[in-house]
Image (tube, rainbow, N blue to C red):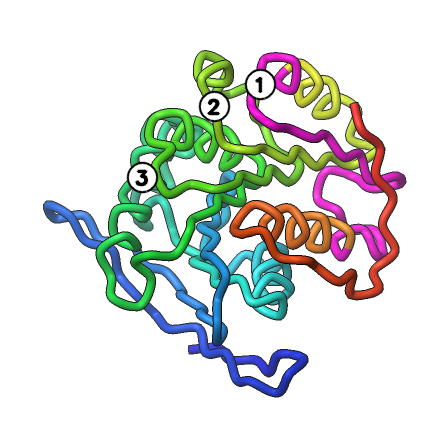
């Protein structure tokens, strides 16, 4: 169990949870700040899970902005060793929807608007899930994602979608531009200058987290958001 203090002095504790259905058990970490304005489910990329350092960094930033988070393993340990399942977007989207259904029933989270944050292949799963069942889903964010993997579903997405790509990640930029053209929902494409696919360069992951927080808060409910001071540059396509 991990905890942190937000900027108002609240202690936010990540609670271990398990989503179960018909013999399937998916482990996750649920972090709920006081007066949460919504909740974001993280759909991790290939070979990653609830302990992903990058997604945990983004989750901490969202929690400081009063957004609850669920970091969840979409695959069991055995499944994660099967490369076919790692890239099975239909299966990953099924698991995102399973997590959403669990959140809509749990007493701690039901009633909260839901967002999806997808990284790499997880972005394709998040967008497919949003297209298949948009109820309660307020926003989707893709980080260095492969939205092209959900291509047949993109024209059906109605949930506002933010695509964030590193400026030096040229192949993925083109994939995101192609996906962006197919999306008919409220949308934005942000290219972070000087960032590679994993946003390892100083300050770039902070930009991702700040863009995501602004997007989620904007769509969870109409509240005025005060910039935390992170210097961000948006390039819209």
Q: CA distance from mark 1 to mark 3?
A: 20 Å
Q: Which residue is disc 1 drawn over?
A: 183
Give the image quarter of residue 60. bottom right
Looking at the image, tell me whether mark 2 or mark 3 is earlier in sequence order. Answer: 3
Residue 211 appears left or right of 91: right
Marks 1 and 2 in Cβ contact (< 8 Å):
yes
Report crowding for label 2: few under 14, some 14 to 19, many 20 or more residues within 10 A (C-alpha).
Answer: many
Mark linked to residue 157:
2
Where does residue 168 sit, x and y in percent of width and height? 84, 33
Q: Which residue is disc 3 drawn over?
A: 97
At 38% across and 41% down in the image, what residue appears?
81
Element assignment for label 1: loop
Residue 44 falls inside the magenta stretch: no
Residue 193 falls inside the magenta stretch: yes
Which quarter of the figure is the C terminus placed in? top right
Mark linked to residue 164:
none
Residue 89 sits above or below residue 62 on the image: above
Q: Nearer the viewer, residue 163 or 77?
A: 163
């Amino acid at each position: 169990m991990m905890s942190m203090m937000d900027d108002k002095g609240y202690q936010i504790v990540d609670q271990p949870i398990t989503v179960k259905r018909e013999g399937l058990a998916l482990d996750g970490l649920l972090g709920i700040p006081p007066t949460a304005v919504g909740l974001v489910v993280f759909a991790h990329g290939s070979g990653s899970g609830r302990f992903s350092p990058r997604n945990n960094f983004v989750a901490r930033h969202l929690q400081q902005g009063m957004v609850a988070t669920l970091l969840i393993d979409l695959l069991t340990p055995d499944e994660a060793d099967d490369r076919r399942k790692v890239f099975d977007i239909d299966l990953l989207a099924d698991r995102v929807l399973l997590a959403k259904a669990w959140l809509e029933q749990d007493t701690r989270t039901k009633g909260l608007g839901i967002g999806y944050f997808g990284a790499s292949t997880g972005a394709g799963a998040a967008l497919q899930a949003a297209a298949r069942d948009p109820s309660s889903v307020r926003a989707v964010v893709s980080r260095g994602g492969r939205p092209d993997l959900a291509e047949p579903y993109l024209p059906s997405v109605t949930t506002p979608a933010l695509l964030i790509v590193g400026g030096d990640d040229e192949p993925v930029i083109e994939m995101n531009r192609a996906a962006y053209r197919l999306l008919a929902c409220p949308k934005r494409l942000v290219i972070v200058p000087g960032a590679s696919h994993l946003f390892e360069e100083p300050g770039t992951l902070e930009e991702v987290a700040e863009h995501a927080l602004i997007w989620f808060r904007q769509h969870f409910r109409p509240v005025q958001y005060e910039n935390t001071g992170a210097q961000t540059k948006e390039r819209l396509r």
